[in-house]
Image (cartoon, coloured by chain):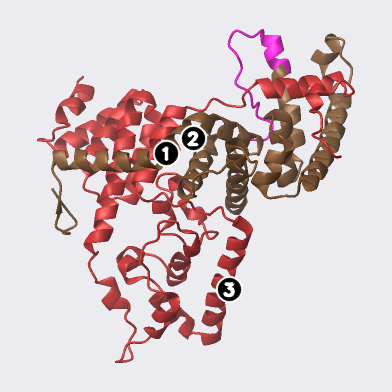
Chain colours: A brown, B red
Amino acid sequence: MEAWGSGLCLNCDELLLVSKRLDDRYIESGTEALFRAHADFVARFVVRLGVAANDVDDVVQEVFLVAHHQPPFDSRRGARSTTYLGAIAMRAASSYRRRQSRIARRETPLDEPRCVADPSMDPARAVELSDNLRALQSALDRLDEESRGIFILFELEGESCRAIAEAFQLPIGTVYSRLHTARARIRKHLRGVSKRSGIAALARAGITA
Amino acid sequence: MTGEPIRLADDVAESKSLRRILDEARNSSPLHYDIEAGLGRHKALVASKAGSPSWSSEPARITRDATFGKLGKLVAVGVAVGAGGVVVALTLVDPRSAPDQDALPASRSAVTDVEPPTPAQARGSIASDRSDSGDADASPAERSDPVPVTPPIQREHRRVSPDGKTPRKATANQPKPPLAADDAVKREIAQMALARALLSQSPARALSQLRATSREFPRGFLTEEREALVALALWELGRTNEAIELGRAFLAKYPGSSFARRVREITKP
């Protein structure tokens, strides 16, 4: 088989050989372990940053391509692999949003429930959980990019402020400040939602805002 | 604030409803991500050497500003030269990629020069369905696996050939160098390998991958296999009528294909 008159002829065995070489080159890069360990985290993070479900894989791929092309991750300065990937994911999500705004479409509406329900869960509880997560996502969607990322990493992913500061290359005081602002806005928004909707399920459970 | 703050979900001073919502969010995932499928795609992208992302990471804002600076200079040159700007735009196109750019407007070709080695290639199938959105954020400086490209300043000197004619046709008729074809072959192989792997796990994604490959390599040398796999993927998705129609067309086109047996199975009444 000859390709484009370039003199490149490949039979099946050669094709397999090329594939194997490509695979070897990839394995040497050592990104596989990083991908296996943290792809789920990155996917979760970018969804919370507002990436539509249909585009999550694209953004995840971008994040790991950047990680692949960068020098090996160095944890000596205090950042963790998750915050390191989180910082890359922030920029990927930002780039994604700019592209989305250019083509002026959004495939997943904001009010779409963003929760993978456990099939064994009580339906009423599943609805309540979905409502709560939607309210939180709505609050997150109103934050600026950096505060949102910091809030998600600290409050939902359990990262430390120091690791976030290292990964985002911010002074730790700035991280505290952004977190404080984000918290205030989230509180205010959720309080407003709670007042407007009454959050029936929470009320039934005797929990007050 | 001097020490690590207490997380809201763990802070008893916060309202119960807020703590509960955050706790639920911590313990639930907004989606299920198929790591194996994602890893397969990642491997294919990396292996294809098209793995340069559409933007870089270090440090993103500075490089982007630098990109716009370069772009701005190009635009300024184009405006200053006036009508000659079109010539500049045409000659800025790398001769190696000229055959591929023929169908594009001249202005688009100039932008392509400051982008990574074509966004569709760089992102493989990632942005295949959004290729029209453009990725002007990227710059050659951000490429971690650079293709040897003539610097723009040198190319400006070639704006007009000695006989006063633009070199447009000369560059357009140049055949692809073997290296570019080799890279394209590897990329196509990698993309087809991914589609093949996805076929049994996720026919929908396999179909999407095949369509992306089809757009990138409309006359690729794995076209035969691609067409067979499209028919099989449609069959797996339950789109039997389309699958049968495509299958029959495939058998008519490639009666002696090594994929004919598999395709024939789905076209059986």
Disc 3: which residue: B72
Query: Crowdedness of circle 1 by 10 Å Cα count: few (<14), some, many (20+)?
Result: few
> From the viewer's perspective, is residue A94 above or below residue B175?
above
Is residue B201 on the magenta stretch?
no
Give the chain of mark 3: B
Give the chain of mark 2: A
The image quadrant of residue B209 is top left
Q: Are marks 2 and 1 in contact (CB under 8 Å)?
A: yes
Magenta residues, as a range? A105-128
Disc 2: which residue: A34
Label 1 secondary element = loop
Residue A134 shows in this picture: yes
Magenta stretch, main secondary structure, is loop
The image quadrant of residue A189 is top right
- Residue under the image location 21 percent in, 48 percent down: B221
> Real-space Cα distance between discs 2 and 1?
8 Å
Give the chain of mark 1: A
- Residue under the image location 31 percent in, 48 percent down: B187
Disc 1: which residue: A30
Query: Crowdedness of circle 3 by 10 Å Cα count: few (<14), some, many (20+)?
Result: few
| Residue A109 image position (x, y, % from top left) | 64, 35
Pick the front one: B223 or A47: A47
